[in-house]
Amino acid sequence: MSQKLPDINNTQDREMVITRLINAPRELVFKAWTDPDHIAEWWGPKGFSNTIHSMEVRKDGLWDFIMHGPDGTDYINKIIYLEIDEPARLVYSHSDDGAMHFLDIVTFEQVGDKTRVTLKIIFHTTEIRDQIMREVGAIEGGNQTLDRLERYLADSAATDDGLYISRVFDAPRELVFKAWSDPELAKKWWGPRAYSAPVAKMDFRVGGKYLLCMRGPHPSGGEGDLYSCGVYKEIIPGERIVCTDSFADEHGNIVDSSHYGMPGFPEAVTVIVTFEDYRGKTRMTLRQGMPAFMKEGANQGWNESFDKLVEALAAA
């Protein structure tokens, strides 16, 4: 791909610089910037998602992807890697739908156990830089992108790279959020297909607790009730819920998983649920910390629950 690149000398009047100190080690931040499975989850301003066609992180390698805007607009992006110094520096050229070439220089500086990320974008002229900053809101977009990187790394640390599920629901974001915060609505979808949810108690505030019951096939045979409880750690209305999750008895006391015939489960895990507008619908993402042996069953159980959530939202 032939490109005329901006001159890298005397760039002060045609560059844009954004710096952020991120609470994660440099190797992890660099990986999040260069691994397609990671970067697809945080790249772009708030509300954007990504489809990555290829990502060859090597000199002259191509990163070919589409950014999907929250209003449904698709943005074709092509990046050519010019310099890679792992884990300290990346240099690449960037074009949006074949136009507006600019140069990105990203540096990763270790500061104790944190990382200072500096993103320098160099344009051909001052006029182009000013136009992009004025019409596209490039500074705000860049800061939102680093916000998402920072949040993504924090969430990954909290959930120990455990379960990850993303679903799109044909319902307003406020309604999908309500399904997690309204006990009566939660009863209509909580639990896998073979289970009902006769109990849902939610003190929906930071520091508040919840108690949920799934009634159905018991791990040790027959049918019975399986209770879970937790504490709400963070709530951003319409956007984000962070809580703990533990096995419980009917009174909301935490019990060992062996109580339900499933020994070896951790006493408590972190659950993070986020909600974003996506093409007139809602993209909901769930992260849950858990050991590897739990993931297959938990993935099936959550997806069956979310199938029921589709039906509950349609009827709401």
Image: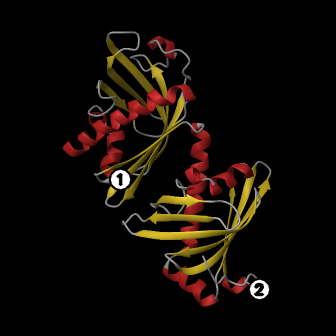
In-image side of 204 versus 171 (left or right): right
Look at the image and name its color scheme: secondary structure
Q: Is residue 35 above or below residue 259?
A: below
Circle 1 sits on which residue? 282
Circle 2 sits on which residue? 10
Q: Position of residue 229 (x, y in %)?
A: 44, 26
Q: Is residue 90 above or below residue 150?
A: below
Residue occupying the point 59% across, 90% down: 127
Residue occupying the point 52% across, 70% down: 77
N-terminal label among 1 and 2: 2
Callout 1: 10 Å neighbours few (<14), some, many (20+)? Answer: many
> Can you say which quadrant of the picture contains the C terminus?
top left
Q: Position of residue 267 (x, y in %)?
A: 55, 22
State the CA–CA distance, disc 1 to disc 2. Answer: 45 Å
Label 2 is placed on what type of residue?
A: Asn
Q: Is residue 205 above or below residue 94?
A: above
Foreground pick, 175 / 66 = 66
Callout 2: 10 Å neighbours few (<14), some, many (20+)? Answer: few
Q: Is residue 76 above or below residue 293?
A: below
Quick one: SS at disc 1? strand
Q: Residue furthest top?
A: 221
In-image side of 105 versus 168 (left or right): right
Residue occupying the point 36% across, 40% down: 180
- Mark number displayed over residue 86: none
Label 1 is placed on what type of residue?
A: Thr
> Can you say which quadrant of the picture contains the N terminus?
bottom right
